[in-house]
Image (cartoon, coloured by chain):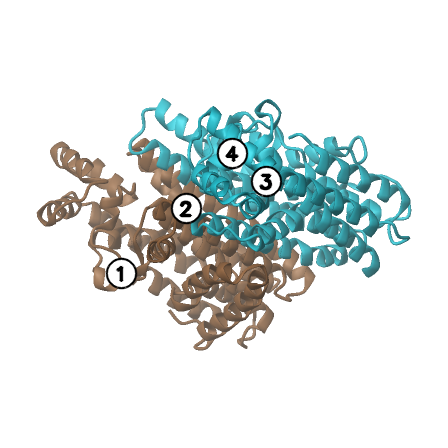
Chain colours: A brown, B cyan
Amino acid sequence: MATRPDDGERVLATLRRHIEGRRTVVAAVDERVDRLAGLLSDFVLDGGKRMRPRFALAGWAASRPDAGPAPEEVVTACAALELIQACALVHDDIVDASDTRRGRPTVHRAIESAHRRDGWDGDAARYGVSQAILVGDLALSWADEMFVTSGVDPAALSRALGPWHAMKTEVLSGQMLDILAEASGATDEQTPARVNRFKTAAYTVERPLHIGAELAGATAETIAALRGFGVAVGQAFQLRDDLLGVFGDPEITGKPSGDDLREGKRTLLLARAMTLAPEEDGRFLAGVLGTEPDGPTLERARAVLVDSGAVASVETEIEELTARALDAIASDAISTHGRDVLRDLAEAATRRRA
Amino acid sequence: MATRPDDGERVLATLRRHIEGRRTVVAAVDERVDRLAGLLSDFVLDGGKRMRPRFALAGWAASRPDAGPAPEEVVTACAALELIQACALVHDDIVDASDTRRGRPTVHRAIESAHRRDGWDGDAARYGVSQAILVGDLALSWADEMFVTSGVDPAALSRALGPWHAMKTEVLSGQMLDILAEASGATDEQTPARVNRFKTAAYTVERPLHIGAELAGATAETIAALRGFGVAVGQAFQLRDDLLGVFGDPEITGKPSGDDLREGKRTLLLARAMTLAPEEDGRFLAGVLGTEPDGPTLERARAVLVDSGAVASVETEIEELTARALDAIASDAISTHGRDVLRDLAEAATRRRA
């Protein structure tokens, strides 16, 4: 998912610099705590697709007539999004009781293992969760610090803080709704659509583009075009995620096969299948949610999703959203080089296999 | 704990305004999520001693020659500390598995109860913890938003962001060390002393004063005096807390009697008793930690703390720290009216019963 070829490296370098600086503060408190901060550092620096910084940089580029590289302070501000994402993932993994992430132990599980290895007192699992809550809080704190001390000029920062703050409230609200939907057994399409809109579309695409555009001093017209593109691509991205969550190859996604069914996730794909499938199939699907299905059960659940027409319907919706997104940026308000970058990002976000 | 008589009301009013504003963003996502945000609102607005905003306002006043009231934007920036505290308490209550806070159910327990009441799917306790993690994240996000959008002038904000960011990393590191100390069974005095220094002294007193001073454009000399005062008062405050955690009246503290022993907290009071007490008493005390002691066991544990001389030693240390604190502000670098306020705050923090 390329913006400029070296953007990924620049994002990584600025993240490394910021995290190393913050760790000197932690190490001054205690070396043992710095080892916990090291887990956050590894988590941020060793993996991830850097989607949000890339979208933010694309928003910046799309708002500039010239096609030069983004200045260092803009890369830094955009890279800060990666630390919000670290908080979101570390806390999500606690909420979902996930054991692995990107093919490695989740942060709470890694801390739990260290507790066991050292033969410490008390419940190792509880200890892992407790420290991981705080590791996530550290990531969220460092995100804000990185953003506001990025060095972008005060006027640009002040503009960009609007979407930055809105995004944080939106993604947390969307995540709370997601958990609530699962617990309350919501089967309507509106609830997952809202989760999709705020937890994914706003957070992953729309607001990063908006932040990049505000950093670049974009016009209202450019911002509106980018946000329109972002909402559509973000929704399509989540629908692709819904499909991968059931049909994805564990070797490529790094997550167990059929993970969303096991977790009982209330996806739009699922809601649509419940609406479209014959009653018996719908009941079967509902019964699988939140269980540990064996191979044949998982296969039958997948067959219900396909045979009901839900998969085809979601694929069509992805196509439509992608078309709508490209349409939104087919205007002079978006720079030519910016449009190329956005098109590549839309492609990568909606056709990916992981 | 008075600074100016109406400071508490002004802090409350600006918190109410900010939270109500943020809740419109949440309500636009989903009304059900806004009900969860309402729990945060109640938590912040209905209780707490507002210690950190008061120290910050005292830092501001102590750095100003004139004795007028703080402008609204300064009150707003200082009040934002209360939202960091809300995150810290909501997350701490999860970590400590506390059922009550300020005599009411903790946030995770309140959410757990609502889940049970509504007969939802899955584990109610896990649901309560999951949503409360996110409620805490919301508080932390809103704290930063309130601080940077307070309206203080950009130069003052830029100065104050230094201690603001340092404070967040320090308190999280201190809290991580606290949990680590408990799990690893640390019995040295150095570990609780560091927890005390960063989790309490820096976070509750030193950095709030520092933030207030930077907002006021204080000289380096004034800042050094305030931080010296803050570290000493903050450490004395925590030692008082250690004593209240074992000897406090549940009617006044709102926490169960002997709560620190039950939780197995590695306080400096405890470490000192382990050093000073006869070996048999030390073993007895260690055996009580993290258990549910009955009345006579609790009484004997208290007797060990007193008879070992640990309580008297900690009381002496509180006196010495308070004297050192007052000494630090006995200079022309601190305004006369500011010094009066600081003296009152030091008194309240170190002689309190709750």
Q: Secondary structure at mark 3?
A: loop
- What residue is shown with label 4? B301
How far apart are labels 1 and 4 at the CA level? 54 Å
Nearest to the observer: residue B126 or residue A269: B126
Check disc 1 and give the amino acid type.
Thr
- What residue is shown with label 1? A253
Q: Residue at x 88, y 52 (%)?
A: B331
Whether residue B73 is visible here, answered yes or no, is no
- What residue is shown with label 3? B308
Identify the mark nearer the N-term, 2 or 1: 2
How far apart are labels 2 and 4 at the CA level? 55 Å
Indicate which disc residue A197 carries.
Answer: 2
Name the chain letter of the residue that bears numbered label 2. Answer: A
Check disc 3 and give the amino acid type.
Ser
**Eye-nearest disc, 2 or 4:** 4
Instruction: Answer whether labels 1 and 4 touch (C-beta < 8 Å).
Output: no
Q: Quadrant of the N terminus of chain B?
A: top right
**Eye-nearest disc, 4 or 3:** 3
Check disc 4 and give the amino acid type.
Ala
Nearest to the observer: residue A160 or residue B278: B278
